[in-house]
Image: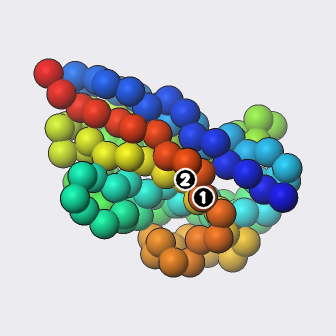
């Protein structure tokens, strides 16, 4: 059974960088589309970025404010998906979750993902 564990969050100053990791165990991630979601305090969880199954290979950014700053990638050898976050802003503060779905295509819809990690806190503050 697939399990996901996020790591890499923390407190960072504005303009700083973090790399979030979503490590999988139990099943190879090659066959899953993986999404990163953010949930800011008092707000609903929303899709940030997604990378398709390895047989598709596409990726998407769903939030305009992070385009050019966030990059999603996967390392199949390490069974891990990453979210590189650069030029961080206070409004990026949220709990970030990774999630998996078997479907071929990316989606930013929370309800279309079957398996979730526990989340990692990202706080951007001076």
Task: Tell me if label 1 and label 2 are in contact, CB under 8 Å.
Answer: yes
Across and down, in percent, residue 60 comes to 47, 62
Q: Is residue 73 visible?
A: no
**Residue 98 circle label:** 2
Q: Is residue 123 visible?
A: yes
The residue that label 1 is drawn on is: 116
| C-alpha distance separating marks 1 and 2 | 6 Å
The residue positioned 24% from the left and 52% from the top of the image is 41
How many labels were placed on the picture? 2
Mark closer to the observer (1, 2):
1
Which callout, 1 or 2, points at the residue further toward the start of the chain? Answer: 2
Q: Secondary structure at mark 1?
A: strand
- In this rendering, would 62 be left or right of 50? left
Across and down, in percent, residue 57 comes to 66, 60
**Residue 45 circle label:** none
Tell me the quarter of the image containing the N terminus: bottom right
124 and 49: which is toward the camera: 124
- In this rendering, would 74 be left or right of 10? right
Across and down, in percent, residue 29 comes to 76, 53
94 and 36: which is toward the camera: 94
Across and down, in percent, residue 108 comes to 45, 70
The residue positioned 43% from the left and 47% from the top of the image is 96
Q: Quadrant of residue 112?
A: bottom right
The residue positioned 25% from the left and 62% from the top of the image is 43
User: Callout 2: few (<14), some (14-19), or many (20+) C-alpha neighbours within 10 Å?
Assistant: many
- In this rendering, would 14 be left or right of 97? left
- In this rendering, would 112 be left or right of 31? left
Rendered view: 48 above or below 102 = above
Q: Secondary structure at mark 2?
A: strand
Rendered view: 4 above or below 111 = above
């Amino acid at each position: 059974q697939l399990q996901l564990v996020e790591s890499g969050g923390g407190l960072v100053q504005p303009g700083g960088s973090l790399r979030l990791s979503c490590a999988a165990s139990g099943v190879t991630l090659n066959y899953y589309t993986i999404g990163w979601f953010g949930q800011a305090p008092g707000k609903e969880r929303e899709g940030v970025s997604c990378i398709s199954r390895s047989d598709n290979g596409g990726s998407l950014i769903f939030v305009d404010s992070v385009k050019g700053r966030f990059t999603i990638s996967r390392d199949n050898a390490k069974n891990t998906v990453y979210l590189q976050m650069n030029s961080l802003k206070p409004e990026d503060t949220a709990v970030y979750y990774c999630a998996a779905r078997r479907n071929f295509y990316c989606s930013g819809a929370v309800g279309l993902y079957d398996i979730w990690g526990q989340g990692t806190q990202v706080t951007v503050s001076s």
